[in-house]
Image (cartoon, helix red, strand yellow):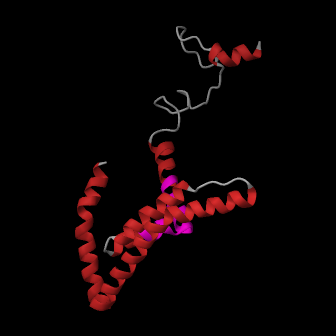
């Protein structure tokens, strides 16, 4: 949450610097046209994202008898439209990523891969113990909950001996 609030506070300054650089590189009129065009596109997306998804779902129901709404896609289009509505190249880039399905899947896949790496590598896996799902000697032990007695001393080879009997 702290990163998000820092990003929101720092965003106007970054956008202002980028707009000045964009104006210096491409000219005032091109920059102004860019701001107006992305603002109009963002407002149009915000206005049409929900109704067009409902119309698509209704056409699908009429054709196949079943229909569903892509809620994540509708939310991404609405949020992307909001980002495009805000003036600035950085929010326009974020908005473009959100409204383009291919870029949205690519960005979400990269974010998910980073989160999985953090869980598996940095936190030690998906298990609950300090070693993750691994025992003290690095092996994974699989047992039925009925086989485990909490009050007896831990013997990692007990399950192997019980199985061999």
| Apparent side of residue 5 relative to residue 91 in the rendered image (left or right) | left
- The C terminus - image quarter: top right
**Is 23 drawn above or below residue 41 in the view shown?**
below
**Is 153 drawn above or below residue 82 in the view shown?**
above
Q: Is residue 39 magenta?
A: no
Question: Image point 38% across, 73% down: which residue?
Answer: 92
What is the tally of numbered marks visible in this picture?
A: 0
**Is 159 drawn above or below residue 5 in the view shown?**
above
Which residue, as the protein is rendered here, is positioned at the far top? 151
Q: Position of residue 128 (x, y in %)?
A: 49, 30
Q: Position of residue 67 (x, y in %)?
A: 66, 54
Q: Which residues are magenta?
A: 95-112
Which residue, as the protein is rendered here, is positioned at the far right? 165
Which residue is at the front of the view, 87 or 137?
87
Q: Position of residue 4 (x, y in %)?
A: 31, 54
Question: Image point 28% across, 77% down: which residue?
Answer: 18
Question: Image point 30% across, 83% down: which residue?
Answer: 22
Q: Is residue 107 magenta?
A: yes
In which image quadrant can residue 158 be found? top right
Res 109 seen here: no
Res 149 seen here: yes
In which image quadrant can residue 11 be found? bottom left
Which residue is at the front of the view, 155 or 119?
119
Q: Position of residue 119 (x, y in %)?
A: 48, 43
């Amino acid at each position: 949450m702290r990163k998000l609030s820092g990003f929101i506070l720092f965003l106007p300054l970054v956008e202002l610097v980028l707009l000045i650089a964009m104006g210096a590189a491409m000219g005032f009129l091109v920059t102004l046209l860019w701001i107006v065009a992305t603002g109009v596109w963002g407002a149009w997306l915000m206005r049409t994202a929900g109704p067009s998804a409902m119309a698509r779902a209704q056409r699908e129901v009429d054709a196949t008898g079943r229909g569903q709404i892509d809620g994540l896609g509708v939310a991404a289009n609405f949020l992307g439209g909001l980002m495009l509505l805000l003036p600035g190249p950085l929010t326009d880039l974020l908005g473009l990523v959100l409204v383009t399905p291919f870029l949205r899947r690519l960005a979400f896949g990269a974010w998910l891969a980073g989160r999985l790496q953090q869980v598996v590598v940095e936190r030690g896996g998906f298990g609950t113990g300090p070693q993750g799902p691994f025992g003290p000697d690095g092996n994974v032990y699989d047992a039925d909950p009925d086989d485990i007695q909490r009050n007896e001393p831990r013997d990692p080879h007990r399950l192997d001996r019980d199985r061999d009997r």
